Amino acid sequence: MKTEFEIFGYSVDIYYRGKYYGCYTIEQPDREVLGYSGRTEEILTENWIYKNKKIKAGQTVTTECYPLCGRMIGTLDQKIKRLAESKQPFNK
């Protein structure tokens, strides 16, 4: 897939017992499939503390990684063309 936006890094969200518990950022993705489809279950090796939320080591958590994107890449004409194509109806 062609990258159309600048990627500043990747964010990894942590879910524990079905609830969002926090996130952290990384420079390179830690998995091949990103987003909801790339969710994985991991066992914590250290205690996780984020603001007032705490999870003890040894607990199983679900993680999800996705890119942190910035502005579009390309010339002004390429950007306008890409935006115009995105507004075309899908069902004709």
Image (cartoon, rainbow, N blue to C red):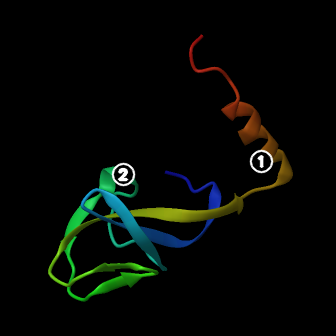
45 vs 80, left or right, is: left
- Point out the residue furthest to the front here: 52
What percent of the width, then of the height, locates residue 44?
A: 21, 80
69 vs 45, left or right, is: right
On the rendered image, what quadrant is the C terminus found in? Answer: top right
The residue that disc 2 covers is 36
Q: Residue at x 70, y 29 (%)?
A: 87
Label 2–label 1 contact, CB within 8 A: no
What percent of the width, then of the height, locates residue 28?
A: 44, 76
Where on the picture, by quarter, is residue 89?
Answer: top right
91 vs 55, left or right, is: right
Identity, as a three-letter code, of the amino acid under mark 1: Lys
Where on the picture, by quarter, is residue 6?
Answer: bottom right
- Point out the residue furthest to the left here: 58
Numbered disc 2: secondary structure: helix
Q: CA distance from mark 2 to mark 1?
A: 27 Å
Of residue 35 and residue 85, the one placed in the foreground of this image is 35
Task: Report if residue 42 is visible in the image.
Answer: yes
Task: Report if residue 13 is visible in the image.
Answer: no
Q: Residue at x 24, y 89 (%)?
A: 46
- Point out the residue furthest to the top here: 92
What percent of the width, then of the height, locates residue 65?
A: 40, 64
- Disc marking residue 79: 1
Of residue 46 and residue 79, the one placed in the foreground of this image is 46
What percent of the width, then of the height, locates residue 24?
A: 45, 77
Q: Is residue 51 above or below residue 35?
A: below
Of residue 45 and residue 47, the one placed in the foreground of this image is 47
Label 1: how many Cα within 10 Å (few below 14, some 14–19, many 20+): some
Identity, as a three-letter code, of the amino acid under mark 2: Tyr
